Amino acid sequence: MSSEAPDPLRGILMKLLSVMAFLGMQTFIKAAGAGIPAGQITFYRSFFALIPIFVYLAMRKELASAFRTSSFTGHLKRGTLGMIAMVMGFFGLIHLPLPDAIAIGYASPLMAVIFAALILKEKVRIYRWTAVAIGILGVLIISWPKLTMFEQGGMGANEATGAIAVLLSAVIGGLAMVQTRQLVKTEKTFTIVLYFSLLSAAFSLISLPFGWNGLSWETKLILICAGICGGLGQIFLTQSYRLADVSTVAPFDYSSIIFGIAIAYVLFGDVPTWQMLLGTAITVSAGIFIIYREHQLGLERKAARKASSPST
């Protein structure tokens, strides 16, 4: 895949465009998803995401090479985990206010740190463990009011179930991130993106016999738009990491909560609670600190390799 010269400002712009595209995807799903099975939503999201991905790869003359893989089993694991996380995340999104679903989803990178230590045996020092613990506390502050709503029944129980679904989605999404870390050692980024969408679309068809809804053309169009937004988001995200360091662009991921609150208020009349705002502030702060520590450790490893290399 052709390399591009570093351009941090364009990288940040691509990251913000990816945030807006993924937020557009979530908004379309929120608008259309009431009563639609999460597996059916996942199919539309995954299948129609392939349209912009195919077009982009064809324009770059990289479509054929993107299908080449040396680790189909790895993609199968990544696709399975990602599809399950999506189904649960979409179920939660349907039953929760949009900002709450976004904020609880911020637990996923925290889970990735834990699983990287347990599965990949990555060394995680006290600073990052502390940040993870604080971040999880923030997620619990957001989630707890929802989890205590089971006794209310009706909408209250739906929100409680939705919160649990998004929490499970974050946990499984953390496992998917760890699997992705394994794949990037041998696979191109767009190969991972392509197989993820293909496998997620195929796996979501398993839910078809359990009852998909008959949809109006308007609802189908909304879900198709959600899928296209998801594909565009993946393209913009990949471009952002080509143009700038992860530590430069990753913190802008958290801008999604600002846009999400605004969209939820205008379109759905959702007003954020103080628990959601406090928990989000704590979780975002912990997430940004983890990104900072990853950047610092990366610089330390680079300096150590340079110091240990033989002089010429």
Image (tube, rainbow, N blue to C red):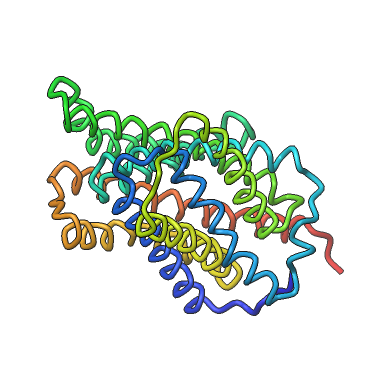
Q: How many marks?
A: 0
Location of the N terminus by quadrant is bottom right
Q: Quick check: 97 above or below 88?
A: below
Query: Where residue 104 sits: x, y (%)?
Result: 32, 41
Near-viewer residue (258 or 229):
229
Question: What residue is shown at x 36% (from left), y 32% (from top)?
Answer: 165
Q: Residue placed at 73% from the left, 74% from the top?
A: 2
Q: Residue 50, image x and y in percent?
A: 59, 59
The picture places residue 63, in percent across and down from the top left corner, at 73, 66
Q: Quadrant of the C terminus?
A: bottom right
Residue 32 visible in the current orientation: yes
Furthest-top residue in this view: 151
Name the one closer to the observer, 220 or 97. 220
* Residue 131 in view, yes or no: no
What residue is shown at x 36% (from left), y 55% (from top)? 219
**Residue 166 placement (x, y as % from top left):** 36, 37
Which residue is located at x 39 percent, y 43 percent? 90
Above or below: residue 100 compared with residue 254: above
Q: Which image quadrant is residue 35 in?
A: top left
